[in-house]
Image: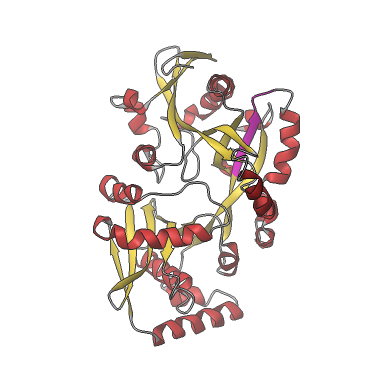
Amino acid sequence: MQSGDSIPIPGGVARLVSRAALRDCPAWQQAFRSKCKDHRYYEILEDTLRDGFEHHYLVLQDNAGNVRAIQPLFFLQQNLIEGVPALRSIVDLVRKKFPRFLTMRTMMVGCAAGEGHLGVSSPQDEQWTTQALHRALQKIARENKASLVVLKDFPSSYRSALGNFSANGYARVPSMPLTRLALHHANFEEFLETLGKATRKGLRRKFRKAERAPKIDMEVITDIAPFIDDIYPLYLAVHERSPLKFETLTKDYFCRLSRDMPERVRYFLWRQNGKIIAFSLVFVHAETIYDECLGMDYSVAFDLSLYFYTLRDIISWALAQRLKFYCSTPLNYDPKLHLGCELVPLDLYVRHTARLLNPILHRAVKFLEPTRHDPVLRQFPNANEL
């Protein structure tokens, strides 16, 4: 399919375009205006992500010529066993000779680094948009030689709007969820008092140990560019330890966030003896702080309990700003469980472009979906929502 070609959809047409075609499109400026990560974030991802991401945008227009939605999507070669750590070592051996073993060219709808949302100009357009997407996506995937279509990490609040997908050919399976903590405390010490006795005791012991070490100073900034060479190795150190890796963020990504979204982005820096030993990237939007990315110096991280030390400072800052919620990214669920967080379910909608293979895929994704391999998730009070 060539960029700009029209696909008939119920009540209009769909066109796959490059970002250049959106430069003077008011609907693109409005598509994600109510979300933490608005259209600027998608532009940053296209400009800074590497590793074979091919970014496009699907313009959905009604018969009256009105652009009702603009939906980002991207193509990549997807690792099919990413969510099954037990198979990774065996598959990695095979891939030394056959690099694309158990990978598949995939078209993903949504955000390459974050949860997915519908790019509608108005909430009233959601149902029309999902009907249009259901009609258009299979054709686009086939024309671009993609075997899988995936709606990536859409919050469970979209289940009603996306019901036509799960009822018509797509398997809906849980993705690794976000977590959320309500912030209704005067300060961090008051928050600690709401936790279980063992958790309180353990955290206070960690903090006392860190305070016996040389002093740790915290700074909150918006421009990370002067410190990018210091923080980027810390990001990579944490990233390499993650059991699930989808994208690798770049130096340009962090710097562009500072430049293009300064009113929403904050960087927390922690220094000891003048050296940066940890950093965290957060977004602030609509009374919520989103803890997006953590980097740590592992030569001191465990001795200083840096994960909990940084978390205390971020929550304390959020409480001082009178924010209402603390949200964090997937993984590392055990400490979040004990801190009283709840799960924020995310869904994957998956379909094979070959009709005969789709029933087989539906059975396979039930095993391959990542949440079934994390026993901690089942301990959350709202785990049934997954």
Q: Quick check: can you spot residue 374?
A: yes
Q: Is residue 252 above or below residue 142?
A: below
Q: Is residue 306 above or below residue 138?
A: below
Q: With 171 as the anchor, is 18 left or right in this view?
A: left
x and y percentages locating residue 279 in the rendered image? 37, 64
Residue 353 forms part of the magenta stretch? yes
Q: Nearer the viewer, residue 374 or 243?
A: 243
x and y percentages locating residue 27 in the rendered image? 36, 27
Quadrant of the rendered structure where residue 55 is? top left
Identify the residue at the far bottom of this view: 212
Q: Nearer the viewer, residue 380 or 334?
A: 334
x and y percentages locating residue 21 in the rendered image? 33, 23
Q: With 253 as the anchor, is 162 left or right in this view?
A: right
The residue positioned 75% from the left and 30% from the top of the image is: 359
Residue 235 forms part of the magenta stretch? no
Q: Quick check: can you spot residue 370?
A: no
Q: Which residues are magenta?
A: 347-354
Q: Is residue 77 above or below residue 259?
A: above
Quadrant of the rendered structure where residue 147 is? top right
